[in-house]
Amino acid sequence: MTGGSLATTSRKGGRAGGRVLSHAVLIGLCFLGLMLMARGMLIPVKAWVAQILLDRAFDQSLLEKRPVKPWSWTDTAPVARITLPRLGVSEIILSGGSGQAMAFGPTLLPIHGQGKVSILAAHRDTHFAFLRQAKVGDVIKVQSVSGQEQGYRITGFQIVRRDRFAYPRDPAHRLLGLTTCYPFGATEHGPLRYVAWAEAS
Amino acid sequence: MPTLPLPGKSGSRLLLGLCLLASLIALVFLTSRLSASDVEADPDAIGSGTLMLRGKGAATAMPAMRLGTDMNVTVSGQIARVRVTQAFRNSGDQWMEATYLYPLPDDGAVDSLKMVVGQRVIVGRIKRREEARALYEKARDEGRKAGLVEAERPNLFRNSVANVGPGETVLIAIEYQAPVRQLGGEYALRLPLVAGLRYTPAQTPVADAANVTAPIAHPKLGKALNPVSITVHLAPGFRPANLISPYHRIAVQHDGAEAQSIRLADGEVPADRDFELRWRSASADPTVGLFRQTLDGDAYLMAAITPPTREPDGPVPPRDMTFVIDNSGSMGGQSMDAAKASLLYALGTLRPQDRFNIIRFDDTMTKLFEESVAASPEQIALARRFTEGLEANGGTEMLPALNAALEDRTPQDGRFVRQILFLTDGDISNEKEMMATIAAKGGRSRIFMIGIGSAPNEYLMRRMAEAGRGTFTNVGTGEEVAARMTALLDRLTAPVVRDLKVKVDGADLDLTPRRLPDLYAGEPLVLLGKGKALTGRLTVFGLIGDRPWSQSVDLSSAKDSPAVARLWASRRIADVEAARWAGETDDATADEAVAQIGLAYSLVTSQTSLVAVDETPARPEGAMLTREELPLLLPAGWDFDVLFGGQATRTAAGRSAQGDLPPAGEAEAMTLPQTATGYVGLIGQGMALLALGLGGLALRRRALRRERLA
């Protein structure tokens, strides 16, 4: 008899405790969800704000004829502006000095060669999202920080594994490669890369 | 209610339980995703560990020029003299020119070149680099035989030989010397046999990358290319014992009580792994090695003094350790993880009697504690949480952190050994100020630099460690953390001798290094000196634990060795290079200083080369000269297909897309960076979690209401 009533009370107590616990877990879930969303949303916002600041710094650099840092604590500097008029795209390219640069803009990958090949990399879901709409024949203009302009025309696209990529050492014309992750809609990181090749015109 | 197969209460409870289970699974899944995206959120680590292969491609055809290498090493005392004879045999029917790239030890110094053509020996002369190349090219174009030795890097050399006739063999013999390494009573000689592939860090624009690369032999050519034979004459000045060769089988022959000859048991081996030989003394470990040489009226001295090993029962002095960790943006990705793992590992080695503090910096700086605290379990747990929460962000302002670390509130306190561990990628611009700060405020602190990632500023870090009387350790990747940090921290646990000072009585000696380091278990103090005469006594003072220790040696007892002057000279070159990297001298001055030393001591340096030219023309006029770069073997364990697959499969993979691709031709392989933030996925997951939580809450409310109704 006594044992039975004890069991009931302890079950009641356990139920109440479980309730408080599950309540806490559910609230925790909501909180975690909000945090993740905020974190996710911060990425495109950061990318967008950085480009505005970079755009200003680039114009300033052109005027002053020396590289101007977009904000005081950055490790990289703007090196060029690329525009793709058909899609209304204009981005400031950063030197590929640090692992963080790509959060702010497309970066110029340091490569070896006679300077006839330039390869840019950016995120498929922020700065290089436009590559999805790019077509053969699209004109890309590159303005360097010293003010020189060079026009390129997209000649083709390529899908490669990230560790199976190669570029010509000594091409006949200057080449510009724009690389980003592939496939475009995916949310996972994968080994494939999308490369748009453009030739100087 | 009774219409339901399950009673209402337990039904809603079941639902709730299912809901909780689902969220738990989601949580587990998410946390794993989170840790993955933490690494990738700051993407993609270009610059912080993305390495590029810059090869010259693969050689698939058997070269016409064949090469055999013989290494003859004489170890006398603590110096190894190595004669490398390379036999270039022309198996084709053309007149040939061949170049071969090969490695030497870091502190090796090439000082002799001989070219053997038939019965004649042509001795190389030391010239300035450009002059040597001009002489070589002139001789080559005129059809005369010529040999050239150039230093492409301090540890990478290139031999060229011109006008080797069909069926002819030309021998190129170079000689170099290097100090034998000594640690814990064990001596080690390492002969690098393979140049390997130079990975050039992505962020260093290396203009002369072509100079340090060579074609790699395709595996189908077999391992028969470039065979090497090795003979070591070991005369260390004591009876050697415990001979070990970890990578090759050896045959040992006794040449008397204190000398042995070591040969490769297999005769000739392919040059695809380094040769290492280790030995000890059969009797008590020697404590003093003293060698001298007189050259052109100057006397040179090399002294290696090993202090007695601390008795095991003596108390280990407590340490006051300050960890400085760089969490600037350039550390993003793998580097930050390696740095954090290193720091966590180090925290685990602290003992209760030690004190510690952590300083983190980017363009801002935080000290974990106002001043160092006792390493109690609570404080260490706090430090672990602090470390785990670090994220790479912002710029690099190292100076305030250095100042904070060097701030010593009790400079006279002899009870604690003050050690500063710097974890950084060394991406610093104000190098001069850093060096000046260490010189001015170093005090009793010892600075240990731990270079994280592909350390572009290795020279500066070495220099800082030297000025701070510590050491430099490079931790490349996450996998290396445990191995490198264990070795470093084991040594740091117990400095054997501190406050070293050297005094020379009766002779005027210019000794290097000037600032003496602490010595750790088994390490000798190696001093190189130059003076007018070697008389009198050299005395080393120091503290072992709290007790003073000193050892005195009679300089006139030094054994003659023909290598000391050149070791001194190559050490001088290292000093000049260090000053160049620290920005103390400009390039032109440093180059000139190196050239002067190279010319005076007949050393191949970045500014001087050895050239040997035959005076009589060999190649008939009109005969063509074919140039050949000899392929290297890939280091053992490397995968040819993985390295060169990029070039081979490029076109095949490329066909899957539309449009014209750049024409196939000579191509450079390259690994592309990670280029997705995955923020859409992140938001989606956040929304899913939120929905789960809200759904669960709604269900609970319904269940509660139902319960109340019941």
Image: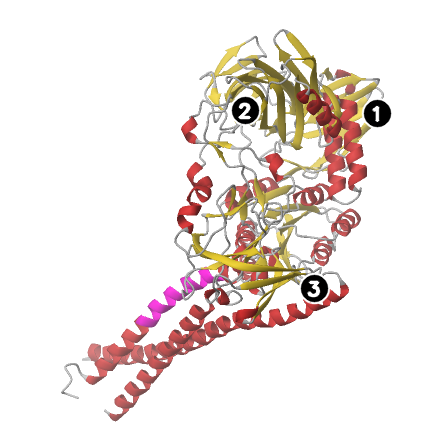
| Above or below, B451 relative to B11 | above
Distance CA(mark 1)–CA(mark 2): 35 Å
Q: Nearer the viewer, residue B507 or B389?
A: B389
Is B346 placed above or below B210 here?
A: below
- Measured as percent of width and height from the top left, residue A26 is found at 38, 77
Name the quarter where the C terminus of chain A is drawn: bottom right
> Residue visible at 80% across and 42% down?
B586
Looking at the rendering, the stretch of residues picked out in magenta corresponds to B22-38
How packed mark 2 is, by other alpha carbons closer than 10 Å (few <14, some 14-19, many 20 or more), is: some
Tell me which corner region of the image, top left, top right, bottom left or bottom right, holds residue B697.
bottom left
- Residue labelled with disc 3: A69
Q: Position of residue B609 (x, y in %)?
A: 71, 26
Can residue B206 be seen by looking at this rendering? yes
Whole-percent x and y of residue B699?
Answer: 31, 83
Q: Quadrant of residue B302?
A: top right
- Numbered mark located on residue B505 in the image: 1
For discs 1 and 2, the disc positioned in front in the rendered view: 2
How many badges with numbers are in the image? 3
